[in-house]
Amino acid sequence: MVSYKEIGLVNTREMFKKAVAGGYAVPAFNFNNMEQLQAIIQAASETKSPVILQVSKGARKYANATLLRYMAEGAVEYAKELGWENPQICLHLDHGDAFETCKSCIDTGFSSVMIDGSHLPYEENVALTKQVVEYAHQFDVTVEAELGVLAGVEDEVSAAESHYTKPEEVIDFATRTGCDSLAISIGTSHGAYKFTPEQCTRDPKTGKLVPPPLAFDVLHEIEKKLPGFPIVLHGSSSVPQDEVDTINAHGGKLPDAVGIPEEQLREASKSAVCKINIDSDSRLAMTAAIRKHFDENPGHFDPRQYLTPARDNMKKMYVHKIVNVLGSDGKAE
Ligand code: G3H
Ligand code: 13P
Ligand code: ZN
């Protein structure tokens, strides 16, 4: 049993309390490799932003669960080395699919876990979430739950269409499970193709897709039912069109990739939404920089040559999200 407290990580409790009161959101960035982690820590250290490092089941399989755990431990020391005296870094399991997965993360130093029972019938979601909360809280580990189903593919959870969270269920769910935060469905979805062209309109000037707005009415109803309760938005990448264009200009093929407009995420950050999940934008920033580099430098084969611009581009994106979208800069001095 390794306690996250011994390795300098924090859970989400204080982070979220301050974020809800301060009208900003904490970034939750997924990482699968060293370059992503370096870029996240550089961005958070430079801006003094609290940060949540997210590890998915896929990341654990790709990079090895033990290695990722030690990388997060190293990240705390790296942040200090970069001059962030009191790093506020949380290590979080993204989309935990079973009690055992959550337990294994809690036992090995995670400070927060998500149990995603959103695909289950309501009572089963309550029971599973409650079981995880009871275990996690013994070790002061915080738990994110999910109610409502996002459109698209949520790891192994698939839904042909979005099922918004039902505001009438949230009080019962939060009370009976004891969860610390709640992921809701208001129209976001995972990946780089969040909406079909049919669901969007087209900007006549640029020809780019303009997605439909998020269901802020549902968010506000939930906020009224659970005042001050931390709300989480998954699937919140914006799919920057300049990165998509770079990828497509250098041999890629991502037609009609579209995300959540940043103005809407900015608005959400000011509400009870205090955690915003971003993964796809990092993948796009990395891929765009690598494709461009290879195109311009066909003779390069040392990974450090193309991973350096990739890491720099990700860092630029993380800083931008922190400062211009979520407003979490300077909140972890
Ligand atoms: O919610 C999904 C995250 O983007 C993680 O994706 O399961 O491919 O690692 P992944
Ligand atoms: P994106 O695919 O929009 O980056 O969402 C990531 C996410 O929700 C991770 O849980
Ligand atoms: Zn997610």
Image (cartoon, rainbow, N blue to C red):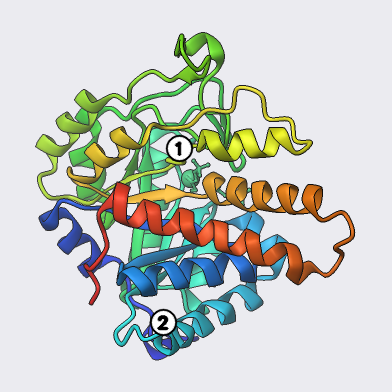
Could one spot residue 147 in this view of the protein? Answer: yes
Residue 259 horizontal/vertical position (percent): 48, 32
Q: Secondary structure at mark 2?
A: helix
Residue at the limit of the structure toward the right, as seen here: 299
Residue 130 visible to an observer of this rendering: no
Around disc 1, counting alpha carbons within 10 Å, would you say few (fewer than 14), some (14 to 19), or many (20 or more)?
Answer: many
According to the picture, the residue beneath numbered tag 2 turns out to be 4
Give the CA separation, mark 1 to mark 2.
31 Å
Q: Position of residue 58 (x, y in %)?
A: 65, 55
The three-letter code of the residue at mark 1 reads Ser
| Percent position of residue 163, x then y | 41, 24
Residue drawn at the location 44% of the way across and 83% of the way down:
76
Mark 1, secondary structure of its residue: loop
- Considering depth in this image, is 326 or 247 the residue closer to the camera? 247
- Which quarter shows the C terminus? bottom left
Give the labeled residue for mark 1: 238
Q: Identify which residue is drawn at 60% across, 73% down.
A: 68
